[in-house]
Amino acid sequence: MTLKKVNPDLEKERSTCTFNIEELTNLLDTGAHCTAERRAVEDKVFSVKELKDEIPDEFLSHKERYENAIRKSVFLHKVLQETGVKRGVYNRSDKSDFRTTYYSIFKDGSPFMLQYSMFVPTILGQGDSEQVELWYKRALNMEIIGTYAQTELGHGTFIRGLETEAVYDEKTEEFILNSPSLSSYKWWPGGLGHTTNYCIVMAQLKIKGKPYGMQPFIVQIRDEETHMPLPGVKVGEIGAKLAFNTVNNGFLGFEHVRIPRRHMLMRFSQVSKDGKFTSSANPKLAYGTMVMVRVTIVNSAATYLSRAVTIAIRYSAVRHQSKLKQNEPEPQILDYVTQQHKLFIGIATSHAYMFCSYWLWDVYVMYQKEQNVGNFDRLPELHALACCLKVISSSDCTGLVEKCRMSCGGHGFMMSSNLPQLYGISTATCTYEGENTVMLLQTARALVKAWELGSRGRPFSPTMSYFAEKNVPSKWDSSLEGILNAFQKVSIGKLSSSVSSLQEYTKSGLSAEDAWNKASVQLIGAAEAWGRAVVLSIYKSEIERYGQTVSPALKSVLFDLVELYYVHLTLEKMGDLLLYTQLSEKDVVSLRKKYEDLLEKIRPNAIGLVDAFDYRDEVLNSTLGSYDGFAYERLMTEAMKSPLNAEPVNQSFHKYIKPLMKGKL
Ligand SMILES: CCCCCCCCCCCCCCCCCC(=O)SCCNC(=O)CCNC(=O)[C@H](O)C(C)(C)COP(=O)(O)OP(=O)(O)OC[C@H]1O[C@@H](n2cnc3c(N)ncnc32)[C@H](O)[C@@H]1OP(=O)(O)O
Ligand SMILES: Cc1cc2nc3c(=O)[nH]c(=O)nc-3n(C[C@H](O)[C@H](O)[C@H](O)COP(=O)(O)OP(=O)(O)OC[C@H]3O[C@@H](n4cnc5c(N)ncnc54)[C@H](O)[C@@H]3O)c2cc1C
């Protein structure tokens, strides 16, 4: 089937766009040169025939899918090396490295994912200069392929409870790695099953019977020639999952496996030949890779949502259903305001988190520089920001990806729409790299501490500075500034109320731990409220900053989205605002009208806004979301690829159905 033109519905939509799409694409890419660079890489990657799937992934067996993913990972690596691309490979050096759109050639992830996202960054972040020199080079050349093995069957969240041991033997100057129980087996690391030959193992260090906490060790697990597991290493794949089925997540156990002393990554803590332990300046530096990945997840979440919303909005523009007015043709479903309500917030939310992710990356890099010269003052704020923004971005975006899927009706249930897979990889971000509730409790811990120190006169860090403001009631103000102020009041109200509950519970005789547990539902609410205030503030201030450099037409549409985001959240969180601010019923009525007006205003730009994400068809991988809008033709073409359609009658008819029909079973 050759499709030459564009669906007239989409043509019409594109003609109503009020701003320059390319200008917005450049902004999302963090610069016109970044757009050009990204497109050049995509041209190269998508022209490699080995990177194309002959049969859609979903029709392959588990084993075939893995083998296909390995083949593609190898060719992708090769082509990226030839292109000289550092983007997203090994190490992010700049926020422009985020838009690694070519990575979507894997619908369900690559078995090399952890090599790039955690193995190499841990070597760079936790190795001393000599270790970086050795291991980074080998990893860069793909002589070694690794993963980050921390989680165990028994413990993922509570890393102080990890059981894998690394016992130092000063006689041989080696560590002995051992898995003392089934629950101590590593479980989950990406690529670990059958792909990696090395890994970073997070294990409890013991010297002369004394524990020194969790430390990173670089451990060879498979022979470099034969790829057979080394003696004492038990390794395999953990099985089928909701998503990431081609990532080859694995399990790993050790039976007294010996590794040289210098295989402990020693940038922060060291073990000398004679077994002397030198502690790092801050023990939490061993958790550094997790902070970095949490920071990058904010961008991943925004990206998954921007893909889903592109698919859903394009499909909603070409899909016609029901009657709005009896004497008129069936309208595009995008004309139903309920459909706009489901989808436009997806565009605004992906902008909010994309711009916040760029800001957060800059904060991370800045704080990192301070830590490199021994200043850890801002580590608690960075940790709280990384935890909290990871949580609200992953949960908001996942909820909206699912909304996009459902907004496509039955066709959104098709794997060929790519919406189920996007939901799968998005929902994983709510669990990995710190389960969301646990991350909110970490945030709350930092907030309560800051609150208590603040009440004793200590200054607040920048994102908490409004805690110092007096919580005096003021008239409701529906401007952006007024709404931001209101959300900060909610944040203060929830935090101070949680702190009061903690104090009351301890006064009534509960231990600090029991009081914390009893108040924890309130505490996660306070943490979320702080995160909301941060996102509202950063999204607005970033758009104000960019607004000074972009055209008036683009500035106007960017602010429509900021307003939509603010008003939508106000209506969503009405209960909290009624409790902690002067919001009245009259204000709510006028905000509802404002919201409806904004949906109407954004409607002509909806297709332009999703086109500006600049996802080519190969990146979206969706029958419903292609640029030309021929959804039905693509659905039929994909259906014909089902192996069942290769023959008119399946053999099971003769074997089972016919005997049943004839009563001969
Ligand atoms: C189609 C495919 C598409 C492909 C797209 C390609 C792009 C994708 C890119 C991304 C891919 C990423 C893939 C990643 C896969 C998942 C990897 C994992 O899950 S790996 C596994 C991830 N696993 C996890 O994330 C495990 C989660 N669990 C944990 O992190 C910890 O156990 C804990 C934090 C919960 C508690 O730790 P514990 O030691 O018990 O600590 P206490 O509670 O007792 O608090 C003591 C003090 O420490 C402080 N502090 C704590 N942490 C930090 C920190 N990081 N820093 C600084 N400070 C920190 C804390 O504030 C407190 O301070 P204070 O009040 O005393 O002043
Ligand atoms: C797709 C995917 C990929 C992964 N990749 C890797 C990898 O490459 N390497 C790696 O090491 N790990 C990896 N993981 C593991 C991941 O990091 C952990 O699953 C995650 O940290 C959550 O830990 P858990 O599974 O122990 O959950 P649990 O902690 O057992 O969570 C279960 C429930 O208990 C609750 N809970 C636990 N502790 C507390 C608490 N203190 N207070 C209140 N509630 C609590 C949680 O909120 C949750 O509701 C991956 C996981 C997934 C899903």
Image: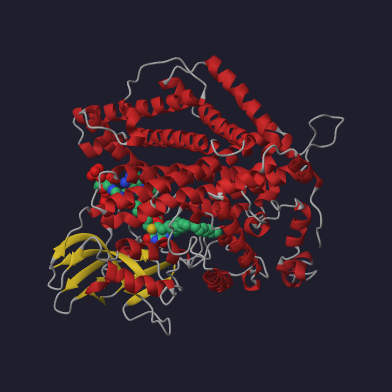
Instruction: Give left or right: position of 363 versus 179.
Output: right
Say which residue appears at 39% left-offset and 75% top-offset: 138
Up the image or down, 650 lies above or below 577; here it is below
Instruction: Give left or right: position of 500 versus 588.
Output: left
Residue 52, picture quadrant: bottom right
Q: Quadrant of the N terminus?
A: bottom right
Image location (x, y in percent) of residue 318: 76, 45
- Residue situated in front as seen by the camera: 31 or 390: 31
Image location (x, y in percent) of residue 140: 43, 71
Up the image or down, 662 lies above or below 587; here it is below
Image location (x, y in percent) of residue 595: 61, 27
Say which residue appears at 32% left-offset and 28% top-offset: 467
- Residue situated in front as seen by the camera: 437 or 566: 566
Say which residue appears at 57% left-offset and 59% top-offset: 37
Q: Quadrant of the C terminus?
A: bottom right
Up the image or down, 292 lies above or below 515; here it is below
Q: How is the image coloured?
A: secondary structure
Residue 440, picture quadrant: top left
Query: Is residue 610 shown to the viewer in this render?
Result: yes
Up the image or down, 231 lies above or below 378; here it is below
How many marks are shown on the rendered structure? 0
Query: Is residue 157 shown to the viewer in this render?
Result: no
Instruction: Give left or right: position of 643 versus 213.
Output: right
Say which residue appears at 36% left-offset and 45% top-offset: 439
Image location (x, y in percent) of residue 325: 82, 29
